[in-house]
Amino acid sequence: MLTNNITSTHPVAFLLMGIPGLEHLHIWISIPFCSAYTLAVLGNCTLLFIIRVDAALHEPMYLFLAMLAAIDLVLSSSTLPKMLALFWFRDREINFHACLVQMFFLHSFAIMESAMLLAMAFDRYVAICKPLHYTTILTKPLIIKIGLAAVTRAVALMTPLPFLLRRFHYCRGTVIAHCYCEHMAVVRLACGDTRFNNIYGIAVAMFIVVLDLLFVILSYVFILRAVLQLASQEARYKAFGTCVSHIGAILAFYTPVVISSVLHRVARRAAPHVHILFANFYLLFPPMVNPIIYGVKTKQIRERVLGLFLRKDVKGG
């Protein structure tokens, strides 16, 4: 049971409502959620295993893909286990500090994913526009620096959030109208002047989405120009074919973000569960489909996965 004890500035715990208006369907909603999470864990762990054990895949493109898979694992695991406990066992209570930790991991790893998609766009740009310098530009030290920069940026931008939220009194109740500790859902419970939190949250989201997406689009403008200058149609098709998986990952990540943003502005009077379902879709969809996209469209990954299962079948036989 949730205690009523209050510390000097915050409650001991919050209660997660789940999906408002659809509480009676939580068990049924948990089925696709659990399936998506299972696919995300299996798919991304498989990618990490294959890239780790196969030395031929220790190239920039696959190292970035391994980073993306690790980010997807943390991103989905930061919310789904607690969400499923809420749906299955009605375990609504979450400790205040655990809530802040969940929020930090959720938002920081979403920022890291955006950075990694940008890094992968840079990888494709170098591979297609500067193929002769690919190995000299994208060295392992540079790849490590790019990974560290993605982590540093996310941590730097998200570290203020828990400290900003700790300073508030929460006089508007302790029930969060969400499935997880989303920043603005927690801010709505706070008393006092929350304008800085509102502005900071929107500013960070706009900065990340606009800046990263702008550079991704710019990379593909240069890539498209380089591809169209190739002599044969076969060469053009082959060059652009190496980008298909990355374009799929970009669409999987940014499309739910854009749809959710448009819904918040166009359909403000829509039922709360509509916005929350889209927010959950944004968390679940990219980690689930990224391994599928790269597994199906990338020949090297596809061959390693098939080889892995075929070896198991031979041993079993």
Image (cartoon, helix red, strand yellow):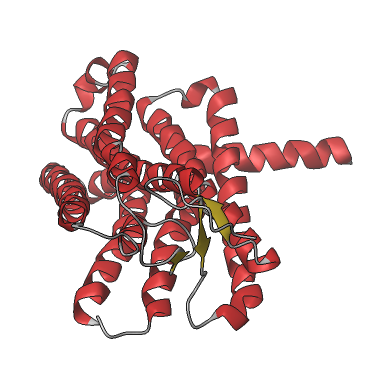
Relative to residue 209, is residue 35 depicted above or below?
below
Relative to residue 310, is residue 58 depicted above or below?
above
Tell me where residue 158 appears, x and y as whole percent.
Answer: 29, 40
In the image, 100 versus 133, the foreground residue is: 100
Tell me where residue 201 appears, x and y as whole percent.
Answer: 22, 52
Q: How many marks?
A: 0
- Name the quadrant of the C terminus: top right
The image quadrant of residue 80 is bottom right
The image quadrant of residue 30 is bottom right
- Name the quadrant of the N terminus: bottom right
Query: Is residue 156 visible in the rendered structure shown here?
Result: yes
Residue in view at x 10 percent, y 46 percent: 225
Residue in view at x 63 percent, y 54 percent: 38
In the image, 199 versus 97, the foreground residue is: 97
Relative to residue 63, is residue 172 depicted above or below?
below
Tell me where residue 132 appears, x and y as whole percent.
Answer: 21, 22
Tell me where residue 177 appears, x and y as whole percent.
Answer: 43, 69
In the image, 65 versus 155, the foreground residue is: 155
In the image, 174 versus 227, the foreground residue is: 174
Relative to residue 223, is residue 171 depicted above or below?
below
Residue farthest right in this picture: 317
Is residue 52 rendered to the left or right of residue 194? Answer: right
Is residue 4 rendered to the left or right of residue 183? Answer: right
Residue in view at x 36 percent, y 74 percent: 275
Query: Is residue 296 visible in the rendered structure shown here?
Result: no
